[in-house]
Image (spheres, grey):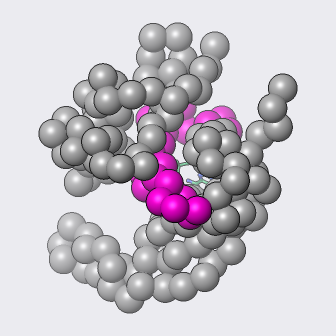
Amino acid sequence: MMELRVVDRSYGEVLSALHRACFDDGWGPNSMDEVLRSPGVYAILAADGEMPAGMALGRLAADEAELLTICVAEEFRRQGLGEALVRAVASVVPRARALHLEVAADNRGAMTLYRLLGFREIGRRKDYYRRAGNSLVDALTMMIEPKKIAPPIP
Ligand SMILES: CC(C)(COP(=O)(O)OP(=O)(O)OC[C@H]1O[C@@H](n2cnc3c(N)ncnc32)[C@H](O)[C@@H]1OP(=O)(O)O)[C@@H](O)C(=O)NCCC(=O)NCCS
């Protein structure tokens, strides 16, 4: 059964392994630990029994939150887990004024997910990401009020 929960720094290596499996420049254990030590950062881990399936990191600073990163292992994609992780990140900070994120303009799948959830595009950072082969890609900045997508308390 899939379970999503907030985890602490002791899960840094598990989170790092997922991140590296999903991104070419995924964060190693030291970088992950450094992020997890930063003020306001929290982590959500999704696991199917013992098997790590996805993760997301959020950060709360004053009354605004940010989705720092999110990934779902390939074999668990297109089953609603990405959506559940974004909602879980929002549910930790239901009183924040905004939940922001950045997404590469060529990441259609992620953008579709965020749009379906109701995120609105609020800006564009030109040539923000560098891809293998040195090509540059814009970042889109998006936001939503977290309480609009936080799951209801059962
Ligand atoms: C983006 C990512 C987290 C989505 O995770 P996921 O668990 O597959 O997402 P969901 O199953 O919740 O998707 C919900 C909806 O979003 C849309 N969507 C998600 N991935 C998509 C894709 N690759 N192509 C098109 N639409 C997609 C679909 O509408 C999907 O609903 P459907 O499956 O019923 O059609 C996952 O593909 C991933 O980890 N990618 C690599 C890392 C990454 O790009 N992270 C985001 C950085 S901003």
Q: Is residue 59 magenta?
A: yes
Q: Residue at x 44, y 16 (%)?
A: 51
Residue 107: x percent and y percent? 48, 65
Is residue 25 among what the camera can see? yes
Residue at (45% x, 37% y) in the render: 43
User: Residue 136 lies in what quarter of the image?
Assistant: bottom left
Query: Residue 143 vs residue 18: left or right?
Result: right
Up-down: is 21 above or below 113? above
- Residue 92, compared with residue 11, is above or below; it is below
Q: Is residue 116 above or below residue 37?
A: below
Quarter of the view holding residue 118: bottom right
Confirm whether residue 32 shows in the render.
Answer: no
Q: Could you tell me which residue is drawn at 30 percent across and 49 percent down? A: 38
Q: Is residue 126 left or right of residue 35?
A: right
Residue 3 horizontal side relative to residue 33, left or right: right
Q: Quadrant of the C terminus?
A: top right
Question: In the rendering, at what x and y percent does residue 96 appear?
Answer: 64, 58
Along the viewing direction, whichever of 25 and 142 lies nearer the viewer:
142
Q: Is residue 52 magenta?
A: no
Residue under the image location 28 percent in, 42 percent down: 37
Rendering coords of residue 82 (x, y %): 59, 43
| 24 versus 92 height, above or below | below
Numbered range of the magenta stretch: 56-82
Q: Position of residue 81 (x, y in %)?
A: 61, 37
Instruction: Looking at this view, name the residue that lies furthest to the front.
Output: 62
* Depth check, front residue: 31 or 95: 95
Count of numbered marks: 0
The quadrant of the picture occupied by the N terminus is top right
